Image: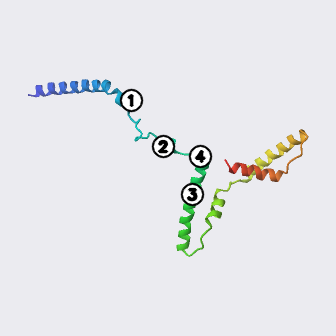
Amino acid sequence: MQHAFGTVLWVVCGASALAAVIALFVGRKVWDEYGKSRLVLDSDAGHEEAAGSPAAGRERDAEIRELIEARNALRRRRGEPALDPELELARLTAPQIDASLREEIRDLVIARNHRRVRAGKEPLDIEAEIRREIESLSEL
């Protein structure tokens, strides 16, 4: 009886392996089409806005407004005055320029002015150009 069990076990394992190999070759088309349905998405990359796009900026601003409103609700419960959402949004989304970056921008503007003077053009106001460069950085 034990000898028959071993034989049956080997026959079943061999038949299963053979059936698996046959199913692999017969079902190749199924595996090629797996995940290509519109109901199955491999990633959300196609639905995401680019980081610097206007739509991403609007979405970011909307989320920040929601957080400010939540903070204002908490402040009102504590009896504190609520913050103006638009002023707080402007403060939070303003470009953060540290001293070293400001100095680097200043060096860039000074070098640009030297090139303008060499070319025979009027030099630009350094402080105004620094502000303009910072504003252009905030648009990125």
Q: Residue at x 25, y 23 (%)?
A: 18
Question: Could you tell me the amino acid type at mark 4?
Answer: Ala
Q: Considering depth in this image, is 18 or 5 the residue closer to the camera?
A: 18
How far apart marks 1 and 3 lie (CA) works out to 41 Å
Q: Residues within 10 Å of mark 4 (few under 14, many from 20)?
A: few
- Which residue is depicted at the point 28% across and 24% down? 22
Q: Which mark is residue 94?
A: none
Give coordinates of residue 91: x percent, y percent. 66, 60
Which comes before the other along the chain, label 4 or label 3? 4
- Callout 3 crowding tier (Cα within 10 Å): few <14, some 14–19, many ≥20: few
Mark closest to the chain's N terminus, 2 or 3: 2
Q: Residue furthest bottom?
A: 79
Q: Is residue 126 above or below residue 17?
A: below
- In the image, what residue type sits under mark 1? Asp
75 over 35 or under it: above or below: below
Q: Which residue position holds label 2?
A: 44
Quickly name the residue at label 1. Answer: 32
The 10 Å Cα crowd at callout 2, few under 14, some 14 to 19, many 20 or more, is few
Residue receiving disc 3: 62
Quadrant of the rendered image containing residue 17: top left
Which residue is the extreme one toward the front? 38
Query: How far apart are labels 4 and 2 at the CA level?
Result: 14 Å
Q: Secondary structure at mark 1?
A: helix
